[in-house]
Amino acid sequence: MVAALGGMLVPALIYVLFNTGLDSISGWGIPMATDIAFALGLLSLSGKHIPASVKVFLSALAVADDLGAVLVIAFFYTAHIDFTSLFVGFGFLVVLLAGNLLGTRRSLFYLIFGIVVWACFLFSGVHATIAGVLVAFTIPARTKINEQEYLGQIYSHAKAFEVAIPLHGPLMTSDQHHIVEEIKRISLDAQTPLQKIEHTLHPWVAFGIMPVFALANSGMHIGSNFFSELVNPVSAGVGIGLVLGKLTGVFGFTYLMVKLRAADLPNLVTWKHVFGVALLAGVGFTMSLFVSNLAFSDDHHVDAAKYGYPPGFNSFQVRQASFTCVRSPNSG
């Protein structure tokens, strides 16, 4: 969490240094966010060369980073708030939380009320992304039975199904049908509603929503003045904030916490791994695009912000991070 905080504060400060006194100062939130999907995807290319603890460290860092970005959007990029709609939304959040505490595990319950909460936040003026984060916290993330109970009950029902006298034909007996239904119920109890929803939504998000979002928002005008625009305060603030700011903030705050004995490095993680993860944390794309559109009404500033995280910056970070992590000792 502290590393994520450093990875947000330092890039924002670098951006402010480049844009103090300018109307583009509102874009200070752009270099704060790490793109989880890209960072983890790029790290996974290293395969077995990277300890699992490094991937967990980057995942935790990126999740905390994105939560911080969502809070920044809520508090600093919301122009007008309709408190009536907001209070109604929080009322339905209480309903979701009560359902969790009372043991409701139907995904449809959380889907319907989650959409209502999303709509209320949308009409309130608070960005609907906040609703998604809050609703996710209300969905049960615990199983009703543990692994040993699940295995025991499945084995017992499998034996009962095996000894049940079958009918000669495509149909099952009523006893066999009852056993199959019990197995389905037990299997649902062994899953968490949160994981079920995530598993269901993943292909839609990975192959539909994210590509459409990227294609719709990543386009930028590249003209004869492209290279001169790279020294624009917005482009420089975003680019240097992501490359050097993330590296300095994540690595520096992690180093400080370890030296103060306030935290320990994860198992098998070396300082070279931390350095590589800090570089990957600066790969900005979806959240940076998102904040850019919220921060600026001027299309010129939006394009300038996009110039700050083009493939050139990201490929540099990826090459350096991959070299650093893979060459690290004790990497398996």
Image: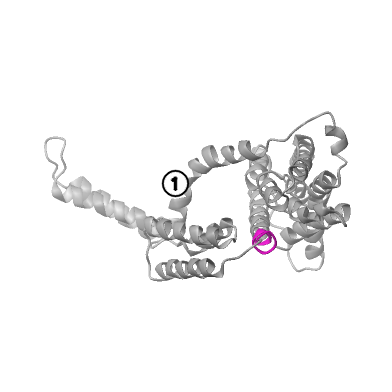
- Residue at 46% over, 53% down: 195
Residue 163 shown left or right of residue 209 in the figure: left
Quadrant assignment for the C terminus: top right
**Region in magenta:** 71-78
Question: Which residue position holds label 1?
Answer: 200
Q: From where the camera sits, is residue 192 visible? A: no
- Secondary element under disc 1, as helix, strand or loop, is helix
Q: Amino acid at mark 1?
A: Thr
| Residue 73 included in the magenta stretch of the image | yes
Q: Quadrant of residue 212?
A: top right
Disc 1 crowd, CA 10 A, few/some/many (<14, 14-19, 20+)? few
257 shown above or below 241: below
Between residues 203 and 247, which one lies in front from this camera angle? 203
| Residue positioned most to the top | 224
The picture quadrant where one finds residue 248 is bottom right
Q: How far across and how far down the image is residue 138, in percent? A: 48, 64
